[in-house]
Amino acid sequence: MKVLLVEDDVKTAAYVKRGLEEHGHVVDSAANGRDGLFLAAGEVYDVMIVDRMLPGLDGLGIVKTVRAAGVTTPVLFLTTMGGIEDRVEGLQVGDDYLVKPFAFSELMARINALARRPPIAQAPTVLRVADLEMDLLGRKVRRAGQEIDLQPREFRLLEYLMRNAGRLVTRTMLLEHVWEFNFEPKTNIVETHISRLRSKIDRGFDVELLETVRGSGYLLRAPA
């Protein structure tokens, strides 16, 4: 089994790594959140063991980021944060939760159980519509090989449109899924962002991909 261990406490990291290797497992380790995210996104693991409190980027941030990018590797949080709310929050993001101090035998039993779970179909990390390409891991967008600079909200808007390419997307759907609004704001926020996005992904190209369906919504269309 190949395991990623993200733990900033030197003694804990050494103890877990040595124990796993004695059981015949291969272990990659990182001592901060940024390095942990780099490994989690770039390598294939059977299980990830992640501390909640890490320098650079916390454990929840690591897991949320790789999950958004389609990485489905089972995650065990190993942490001192043992409150009920902490456990619930961790289990909503990861797959299991073990509080320090812990028995190594229990850690082994939990990661073995996670590794036995049937794999979830891997979600794509790159979205493509015609010559428009979105790299979810690298947070990059290109059209016809030309990089397009998007603001975070524009990126989310385009991601939603690309995931629903060829289908009509209403203003209400965009407000709920991109802005997380459950009410109708008295602004033209959607129209403004659509206009900016269209100018970036369509202007200067032979074919326009983003279409406004008057009175209904928007459509990201892949030319036949």
Image (cartoon, rainbow, N blue to C red):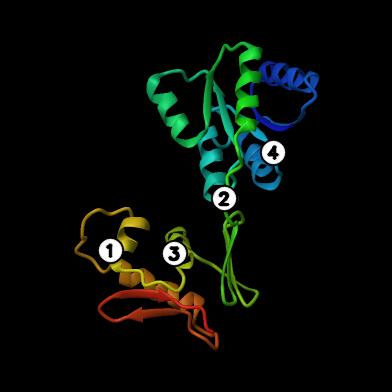
Is tag 4's residue or tag 1's residue first in the polypeptide sequence? 4
Give the quarter of the image for residue 16: top right
Q: Distance between the residues labelled 4 and 1?
A: 39 Å
Within 10 Å of disc 2 (Cα), the crowding (few <14, some 14-19, many 20+) is some
Element class at badge 4: loop
Element class at badge 2: loop
In the rendered view, would you say 48 is above or below 87?
A: below
In the rendered view, would you say 50 is above or below 121?
A: above
Please name whichever residue, 56 or 28, is drawn nearer the observer in this view of the structure: 28
Q: How far apart are marks 4 and 2 (CA)?
A: 14 Å
**Residue occupied by mark 3:** 154
Marking on residue 172: 1
Marking on residue 158: none
Give the quarter of the image for residue 184: bottom left
* Quadrant where the C terminus is found in the figure: bottom right
Amino acid bearing label 1 = Thr
**Residue occupied by mark 4:** 45
Q: Residue at x 61, y 15 (%)?
A: 106
Residue 72 pos. (x, y %): 58, 43
Q: In this view, does 172 lie to the left or right of 60?
A: left
Q: Distance between the residues labelled 2 and 1?
A: 26 Å
Residue 216 pos. (x, y %): 28, 75
Q: Which residue is drawn at 36% across and 74% down?
A: 218
**Residue occupied by mark 2:** 70
Amino acid bearing label 4 = Tyr
Q: Distance between the residues labelled 3 and 1?
A: 17 Å
